């Protein structure tokens, strides 16, 4: 990783934060519903999807609450 390259974890705009929030909520809810209602033979994949959803929700909330973090 060069000196000028940075990873951008928080979305740059409020609109993207809202989009990430909606996607994260959809992923987390879908994974929880699948884990609780069906007999999935691969629950590890659904757990990974749920964790990804929670991470997206956390990053989007951080961007919405603190605008100075956007794009970082």
Image (cartoon, rainbow, N blue to C red):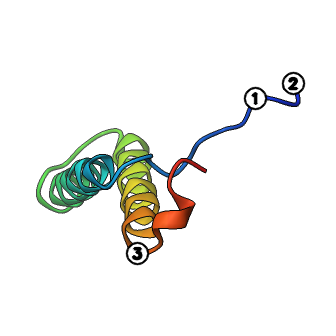
For mark 3, give the secondary structure. helix
Image height of 41 relative to 58, above or below: above
Which residue matches tag 1? 5
Image height of 1 relative to 71, above or below: above
Residue 6 % position (x, y): 72, 36
What residue is at 88 percent from the left and 31 percent from the top?
3
For mark 2, give the secondary structure. loop
Which residue matches tag 3? 65
**In-front residue for pair 16/42:** 16
Image height of 40 relative to 54, above or below: above
The answer to whether mark 3 and mark 2 are in CB contact below 8 A is no
The residues bearing labels 1 and 2 have C-alpha atoms spaced at a distance of 5 Å
The residues bearing labels 3 and 2 have C-alpha atoms spaced at a distance of 30 Å
- Which residue of the protein is positioned furthest toward the top in this rendering? 2
Q: Residues within 10 Å of mark 2 (few under 14, many from 20)?
A: few
Mark 3 or mark 1, which is nearer the start of the sequence? 1
Which residue matches tag 2? 2
What residue is at 13 percent from the left and 51 percent from the top?
38
Q: Residues within 10 Å of mark 1 (few under 14, many from 20)?
A: few
The residues bearing labels 1 and 3 have C-alpha atoms spaced at a distance of 25 Å
Direction from residue 40 to residue 72 in the image, left or right: right
What residue is at 24 percent from the left and 56 percent from the top?
18
Mark 2 or mark 3, which is nearer the start of the sequence? 2
Direction from residue 33 to residue 72 in the image, left or right: right
What residue is at 75 percent from the left and 29 percent from the top?
5
The answer to whether mark 1 and mark 2 are in CB contact below 8 A is yes
Q: Residues within 10 Å of mark 3 (few under 14, many from 20)?
A: few
User: Can you tell which mark lies on residue 55?
Assistant: none
């Amino acid at each position: 990783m060069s000196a000028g390259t940075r990873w951008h974890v928080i979305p740059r705009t409020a609109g993207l934060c809202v989009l990430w929030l909606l996607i994260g909520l959809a992923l987390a809810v879908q994974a929880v519903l699948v884990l609780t209602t069906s007999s999935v033979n691969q629950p590890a994949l659904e757990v990974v999807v749920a964790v990804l959803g929670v991470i997206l929700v956390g990053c989007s909330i951080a961007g919405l609450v603190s605008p100075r973090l956007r794009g970082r």
